[in-house]
């Protein structure tokens, strides 16, 4: 059933030149659980029969391949370093259908991006959006130049924080920074590693209140993910959490967040409308002009 439904959706996608919904998972402070969320959210989408590309943008410090339990032999560094490399050559697809691009880890993977590299990547992306229903970017911490370019282009921004005050203030700063560049951007707030549902909701409410009060910007309270030892167990076993511990509290929470996202957000952006492609074009045009 899922296969049929997926086949149909992909046909529609092709025939109408629909483009993928693009999501960036960001945080202010590092180590709050972005990668873990990005991977398992993508797997949950995949389990729903959606065609997903998971893109690790934490260049040189990437870990989505580790969370997935994979060892890809090509990474984004190969794409950046060799202009002949096509983006398809660095996409790996698992038996279960999960497609991903690895950011590589290790210092040799840290590359300087110049404008030409960013442009090549943006061009490659504007063709990939026709092959997937969702593209999920797992971002590194901070606001590097290439990160900001990409953030400006994506449809939705998932902001991950923990209840820790430093994580919350950094998440606010990150959103403020993005908001100053694009007032229309949608933010979806997630509190990870909450000791209780209440702690998570309190944290998100504080963040939301700050956004409304200081920037007059509404944001979505998206979900609370519990502190859960299953996360570490999964990493140790080198199998994704959602696959190895589907009934853990955190897996169930991730699935709930996904349901919520899909129920409010089921349609893909048409390339006619203001979306990823037109944002990319705008950025490319601005760069060239
Ligand atoms: N909900 C959670 N419960 C317990 N540990 C978690 C949880 N989420 C993340 N972690 C742990 O926190 C660390 C950072 O997670 P990671 O996803 O790599 O963060 P980021 O991508 O934001 O740097 C990892 O060791 C991970 O296992
Ligand atoms: Mg990460």
Image (cartoon, helix red, strand yellow):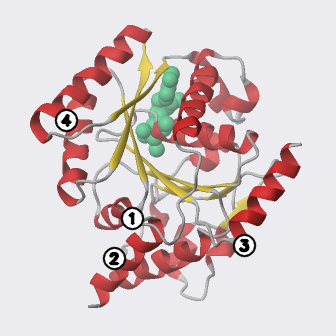
Residue 223 seen anywhere in this rendered image of the structure? yes
Q: Nearer the viewer, mark 4 or mark 3?
A: 3
Dot 4 or dot 3: first in sequence order is 3
Mark 4 residue element: helix
The residue indicated by pointer 2 is 283
x, y percent for residue 203:
30, 20
Are discs 4 and 1 less than 8 Å apart at CB?
no
Are discs 2 and 3 less than 8 Å apart at CB?
no
Q: Which mark is residue 273?
A: none
Dot 2 or dot 3: first in sequence order is 3
Residue 36 seen anywhere in this rendered image of the structure? no
- Above or below, 146 against 155 in this view is below
**CA separation, marks 1 and 2?**
8 Å
Mark 3 residue element: helix
The residue indicated by pointer 4 is 211
**CA separation, marks 4 and 1?**
21 Å
Mark 2 residue element: helix
**Rendered residue at 71%/45% (across/down):** 46
Are discs 4 and 3 less than 8 Å apart at CB?
no
Q: Quadrant of the N terminus?
A: top right
Dot 2 or dot 4: first in sequence order is 4
- Above or below, 110 against 264 in this view is below
The residue indicated by pointer 3 is 15
The residue indicated by pointer 1 is 153
x, y percent for residue 37:
53, 36
**CA separation, marks 3 and 1?**
24 Å
**CA separation, marks 4 and 3?**
40 Å
x, y percent for residue 86:
63, 81
**Rendered residue at 49%/65% (across/down):** 109
Q: Local crowd at mark 4 within 10 Å, few (<14), some, or many (≥20)?
A: some
């Amino acid at each position: 059933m899922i296969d049929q439904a997926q086949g149909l959706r992909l046909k529609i996608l092709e025939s109408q030149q629909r483009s993928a919904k693009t999501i960036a998972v960001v945080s202010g402070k590092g180590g709050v659980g972005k990668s873990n969320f990005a991977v398992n959210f993508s797997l949950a989408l995949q389990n729903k029969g959606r065609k997903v590309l998971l893109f690790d943008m934490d260049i040189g410090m990437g870990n989505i391949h580790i969370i997935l339990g994979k060892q890809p032999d090509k990474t984004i560094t190969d794409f950046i370093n060799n202009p002949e490399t096509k983006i398809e050559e660095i996409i790996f697809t698992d038996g279960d259908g999960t497609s991903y691009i690895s950011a590589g880890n290790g210092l040799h993977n840290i590359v300087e991006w110049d404008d030409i590299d960013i442009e090549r990547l943006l061009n490659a992306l504007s063709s990939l959006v026709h092959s997937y229903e969702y593209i999920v970017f797992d971002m590194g911490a901070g606001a590097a130049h290439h990160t900001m370019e990409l953030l400006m282009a994506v449809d939705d921004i998932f902001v991950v924080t923990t209840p820790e005050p430093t994580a919350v203030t950094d998440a606010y700063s990150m959103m403020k920074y993005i908001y100053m560049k694009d007032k229309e951007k949608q933010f979806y707030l997630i509190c990870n590693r909450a000791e209780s549902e209440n702690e998570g909701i309190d944290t998100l409410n504080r963040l939301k209140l700050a956004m409304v009060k200081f920037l007059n910007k509404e944001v979505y309270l998206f979900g609370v993910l519990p502190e859960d030892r299953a996360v570490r167990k999964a990493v140790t076993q080198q199998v994704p959490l959602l696959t190895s511990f589907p009934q853990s509290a955190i897996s169930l929470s991730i699935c709930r967040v996904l349901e919520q996202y899909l129920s409010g957000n089921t349609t893909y952006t048409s390339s006619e409308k203001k979306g990823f492609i037109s944002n990319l074009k705008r950025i490319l045009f601005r760069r060239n002009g």
